[in-house]
Image (cartoon, rainbow, N blue to C red):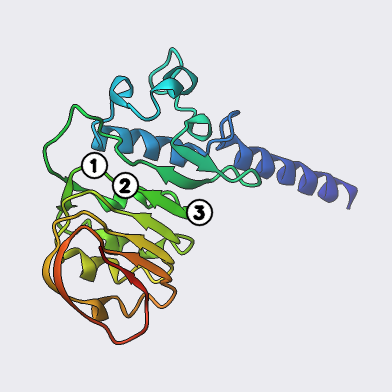
Amino acid sequence: MEVIKECFWVLLVMMILSLYGSRRSNGCWEHERIALLQLQDHFNYSPQFDNYYYWSYYNYYSDNADDVRCCNWERVRCSAATGHVTQLLLGEIRGWNSFEHWYLNASLFLPFQQLKQLDLSDNNIAGCLKNEGFEKLSTLENLEFLNLGVNNFNTNILSSLSHLSSLKYLYLYENAMKGRIDIQELDAMSNLEELDLSGNNITKFISSRGIDYILI
């Protein structure tokens, strides 16, 4: 019996070590570290053109280009308790050197299952790649804040966003939305508290429930 107990504790310790071995010493989970590298490539990110967080370049990068200290990057916030990424502050991440419109692969955010806040503002995003739209993020049950302002989305994005029932704050200001918008497309977003559509060329709204819409 004592041998069985000893084997049990040895196995338990090995499991714990294996679990925490997937995290780096800086608190970044390995699968999220890899996902951040993929996002950098997708956004064509260049630290030297990161005019908002340029001063964090030396804190973020080491001599090894693949050594991403994700929880120490100024554009990332992590939970102190779990080490998982909870916020991605990717506004204007493409920098002033990139003005062309491009298409987003929203699936790249799926590894961040504890994500609460996602800022993609001011990135010249014209839409999403085929079958890689924001509906993919419906599995991110903790996502409450999404900022897509100052991009080039049109009204077609609303049907994709309607799958994000956990959202409380949605910002779509200064995009390429025109004409009449049927807000009923967002009725599935039962937790939505704030929706900002200002700075678009919207002529009329139709709504079936009482949300306060910001329109300038």
Quarter of the image where one finds residue 187: bottom left
Instruction: Farthest residue to the top: give it.
Output: 63
- Residue 156, horizontal then vertical, whole percent: 15, 66
Badge 1 marks a residue whose secondary structure is: loop
Circle nearer the viewer, 3 or 1 = 1
- Amino acid identity at mark 1: Asn
- Amino acid identity at mark 2: Leu
Q: Residue at x 42, y 44 (%)?
A: 88
Provide the residue designation for mark 2: 120
Badge 3 marks a residue whose secondary structure is: loop
Provide the residue designation for mark 1: 123
Q: Residue at x 88, y 53 (%)?
A: 1
Provide the residue designation for mark 3: 114
Q: Residue at x 22, y 29 (%)?
A: 96
- Work out whether 124 lies above or below 206: above
Quarter of the image where one finds residue 54: top left
Q: Which mark is residue 24?
A: none
Q: Disc 1 and disc 2: Cα gap in Å?
A: 7 Å
Q: Where's the C terminus, which quadrant?
A: bottom left
- Work out whether 211 lies above or below 78: below
Q: Residues within 10 Å of mark 2 (few under 14, many from 20)?
A: many
- Residue 111, horizontal then vertical, whole percent: 41, 49
- Work out whether 135 lies above or below 209: above
Circle nearer the N terminus (3, 2)? 3
Circle nearer the viewer, 3 or 2 = 2
Q: Of residues 95 and 135, which is closer to you in this image?
A: 95
Marks counted in the figure total: 3
Q: Are marks 1 and 2 in contact (CB under 8 Å)?
A: yes
Badge 2 marks a residue whose secondary structure is: loop
